[in-house]
Amino acid sequence: MYDSIAGGLGMHVFLMFSSFLCVWVFLFCFVLFFCFCFCRNINQVKAGNETQISEFLLLGFSEKQELQPFLFGLFLSMYLVTVLGNLLIILATISDSHLHTPMYFFLSNLSLVDICFASTTVPKMLVNIQTQSKVITYAGCITQMCFFVLFIVLDSLLLTVMAYDRFVAICHPLHYTVIMNPQLCGLLILVSWITSVLNSMLQSLMMLQLSFCADLEIPHFFCELNEMIHLACFDTFVNDMVMYFAAVLLDGGPLIGILYSYCRIVSSICAISSTQGKYKAFSTCASHLLVVSIFYGTGLGVYLSSTMTQNSHSTAVASVMYTVVTPMLNPFIYSLRNKDIKGALTQFFRGKQ
């Protein structure tokens, strides 16, 4: 009976994610075809005042020269901590066979994505500060935007997968090893990657259809999608609709899934009679809950700050929280109170001596 229940739950998840992927592929193809036809018609009626774009200007945080060494040192140190911390998490999960579990498999994938996420924006910013240049090529800007969209969506989807893992571990502990089998874990990661890549491709192809005028200054430290759309010469209604639709589907959808998972988790924890059992159950998901709160809290803060104020520099400063600070904090959150991670790292370094 247990096997049939576990198999049913696993099949339910498989069908849910497969359906989600099929729907998204269909929407991707439909929207892409519609946008291609729309943009082709627009191009036929454009006036001859558009300019061939070769580069953009990233305004960054401050133009004061005395602040540049401080900003360079600050972001270089944060980037190195981010890369080193997340790399240690990956090495710990690979080297210790006791950590070859779904939870740490998802955590190592999240650490890899966080390294890529930070590497998408910070190195270019450091180069611009060091060379005192604000220039980024058109191709470089589109590429940076493409990877930024890819990894931020992938981050959100991985956090949702990790929330489901904690839901199964706490609400269905007897079926955990059967439900979260290697095939399902691999499928969840694969679907997350495919969905993120498709969305990134869609946003990039939409951006390539836009024409830009003389104002090529981006009031940000990286090529942010919304800021680039606002630089276009002509109507960007379709781009805005696709961007907001993707945000609702790929950010709002995972957030709803996370909230539902934790509602079920809290309900299961409250049903535990012993205080020690409640503490043990809560401690297994406390780190993930904190990371989710920081990720979505800072993202929501950036959105609210951009809608409530017209100061783009304030928005750029606020966006540092989820683009740089959150990937840097994740290794500390997952390792400081995690005896398994600390034990694996200690064993790893002792083995190197």
Image (cartoon, rainbow, N blue to C red):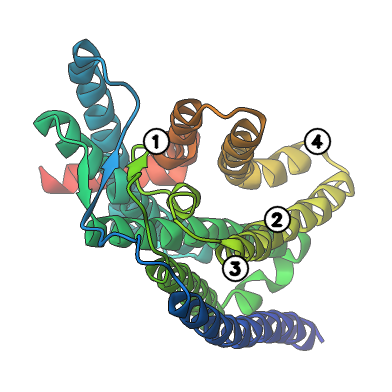
Residue holding disc 2: 258
Instruction: Name the residue rendered at 56%, 42% in the picture.
Output: 295
Discs 2/1, front: 1
Q: Are marks 1 and 4 in contact (CB under 8 Å)?
A: no
Rendered image: mark on residue 219: 1
* Residue 275 numbered tag: 4
Looking at the image, residue 157 sits to the left or right of residue 56; the answer is right
- Look at the numbered discs 2 and 1 and tell me whether their residues touch, using CB distance below 8 Å: no
Query: Whole-Å distance between the Cαs marked 3 and 1?
Result: 23 Å
Measured as percent of width and height from the top left, residue 27 is found at 62, 82
- For mark 3, what is the residue? 238
- Residue 217, x across and y down, in percent: 34, 40
Query: What amino acid does circle 3 point to?
Result: Val
Q: Mark 1 falls on what kind of element?
A: loop
Q: Upstream in the sequence, badge 3 or badge 1?
A: 1
Q: Amino acid at mark 2?
A: Ile
- Mark 2 and mark 1 lie on one chain; the one further toward the N terminus is 1
